[in-house]
Image (tube, rainbow, N blue to C red):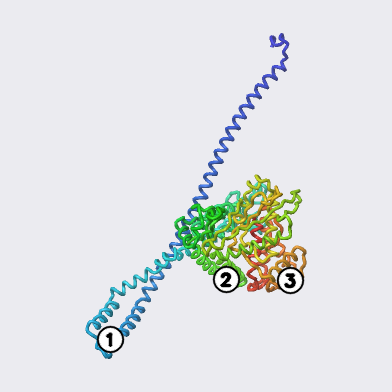
Amino acid sequence: NESNNDNGIDDDEIDNVENNDSDAHLSAFLSEEVAKLKAENDALSNRCACLEAQNILVASQQLDFLSRAIAWILSLLSYFIFVKILWNVYPALVGCMTQHTAATLSMIHVFSLSSDYQCNEYICGAIEVIRYILMSPVTMSAFKYVLATLPYVHNKFFQGLTHRRFEVFAVAFIMIVRVKLTRARIRLFIGDSDSNEKKKSSWRGDGDDDNEQNGYKTSAYGESVDEDAIWDANYEISARFMYASVIRLRGLWTKSAQYISSRADVMPVPYIRELGKLMDEAPETPWEDVQKTLSKCKGLLENLDNIDKRPIASASIGQVHVANLKTTGEKVVVKVQHPSARATMTDDFVSLKIISRIVTLLEPEFEFFEILMREWAVEAKKELDFDFELSNLEAALTSVDSMTASLPSGSMSTDATPKSVSPLSFRVEIPRPYHELSNKDVLVMSFCEGRRVDDLESLKEWNLPRVAVMNAVTKVYAHMMYVTDIFNGDPHPGNIFIRPGTGIKGEDHGFTVVVLDWGLAKRLPEEKRIAFCQLTYAAATLDFGLMLDAVDTMGMKMKREDVGEDMQGTRFLLRDMAPRKIARKRIKAKRKNDVKLFKSRKKGERLPMSSKGYPGELFFFFRTNELLHGL
């Protein structure tokens, strides 16, 4: 201290230097420890994520194995019942056949003896040998075993459809059971949502903040869980199980999965993520089988060049290959139907008919479900004949031309939005079909450039506002649904492409909307089209009288008179678009309210209209509307 004082340094300054050195060492030490803790936390997070993914995948694989096992058990059980019936009925069948055979041979024998020529001993001997062979135990046993192999032969000949039907019902059974088990878990760990407040003291303690932190409910088992967490766990496993099942079953269920994955406003994220892979990545048909189908189309292979053996997309009914026309070199796409599509889709509609019939028997009020499924079956079966799609494409081209017929520039423009997005010009493009190169299994169309409408990175790269793109898409569908007589009934993201530019000279900005896949399209009679226009306008303007006129024109038969509730329901069906979280919140609230009303009413008064009074066109009108909501 003396030396420091001699040098003119104060004690306070020495203390400050020591404190600064201490703080620097402490800060460095803490930074080092924080870095270690962060690294350990990242490692633990990665490990937990891997374990969680493994648990989810193992659970989904177990469900897949269980569904296969149930299907095999059902197949073997039905085969055992068939054999059992055959073995019990067979003696009577054999006796009847023996009597008829003996009587026939006797008549032949008598006829030959009574005729002008005598039956020589060779013919009589042959008759006796035939009688002996047919009536011998060895022949009868062989015939019995041949009949026993018929189910196996039928299953092999019809591409395994008999066993596949059992697989469909097994998957449906597991999905239903999982939903019921999830609800049971919620009742066990969370309790009845309607009486949570009443049960807090007896079930979760006295309802203090310690038992209800961050929105979680502490059950009698001491675990902090909430209802959403339980459902999310179920969704993660069920979505992967459903994806694996659809990949295996294909057919109609691929199309159903595409619809589910398109409803982002309703369905949980895991279903959107997993089933969204099926939009254009369904199982492919090998090139050898594709080539056989192409060779059956007269003159096709002679007029095409550079056919790509790998499809650019594969869906439930067919897959698409790129090629060039030999004459002009124009790039075209060749849509080829899967060889098994017709058989599997037809069988799936039989399964769907059985399911809808069971629903109708259990709940007669829901007979409309069978009517709507029948309408879907009628229209979806047309997808199996590409001649229908060719006709739809021509009608769609006429519809699009009518949109811009009165516009000098040949393009339309989007509306200005509250977010200050300036109007953009846009054009609509529909693939152009080639009659002479197509048949019911093959469809050749012009190639349309673009990327999927839900490719947000591309939209960002092209500087196209999402709100403007959706405004254009809804304008296109509004014109088709309300102005012309045909609209595309399957507007999922895989069927709508976007590309920058309109292709019109003098327009440097804007974009093009490409609408693909016109197999599932609906043509409305003029009277029904106007009725749908009236219904939508009535809902927008709260015109109760016009709404009743529209309902009457559609052929709906109302069972009760509650115009206010009917208007509310119609406005909800035709509601404005909303972001996903808001949309799901609205739908959950609506469902909860509808369930309460449904339970409070007597049978026969639960639905606003007669089950037989639902027009089939209503299904496709609202299906298209709901798919656009999902988009």
Q: Residue furthest left?
A: 121
Alpha carbon distance from label 2 to label 1: 60 Å
Observer-side mark, 2 or 1, equals: 1
Earlier-in-chain disc, 1 versus 3: 1
Is residue 507 found left or right of 161 in the rendered image?
right
Looking at the image, which is closer to me, 376 or 548? 376
Q: Which mark is residue 363?
A: none
Dividing the picture into quadrants, the one containing residue 180 is bottom right
Earlier-in-chain disc, 3 versus 2: 2
Given the image, on which type of amino acid does mark 3 rest? Leu
Q: Which quadrant, please, contains the C terminus?
A: bottom right
Residue annotated with mark 2: 362
Question: Can you give x and y, in whole percent of width and height, for residue 31 in the image?
Answer: 62, 30
Given the image, on which type of amino acid does mark 1 rest? His
Earlier-in-chain disc, 2 versus 1: 1
Tally of numbered discs: 3
Is residue 510 found left or right of 141 in the rendered image?
right
Under tag 3, what secondary structure? helix
In this rendering, the answer to whether 375 lies above or below 338 is below
Q: Is residue 586 visible?
A: yes
Given the image, on which type of amino acid does mark 2 rest? Leu
Residue annotated with mark 3: 548
Q: Residue furthest front?
A: 327
Alpha carbon distance from label 3 to label 2: 30 Å
Residue annotated with mark 1: 109
Under tag 1, what secondary structure? helix
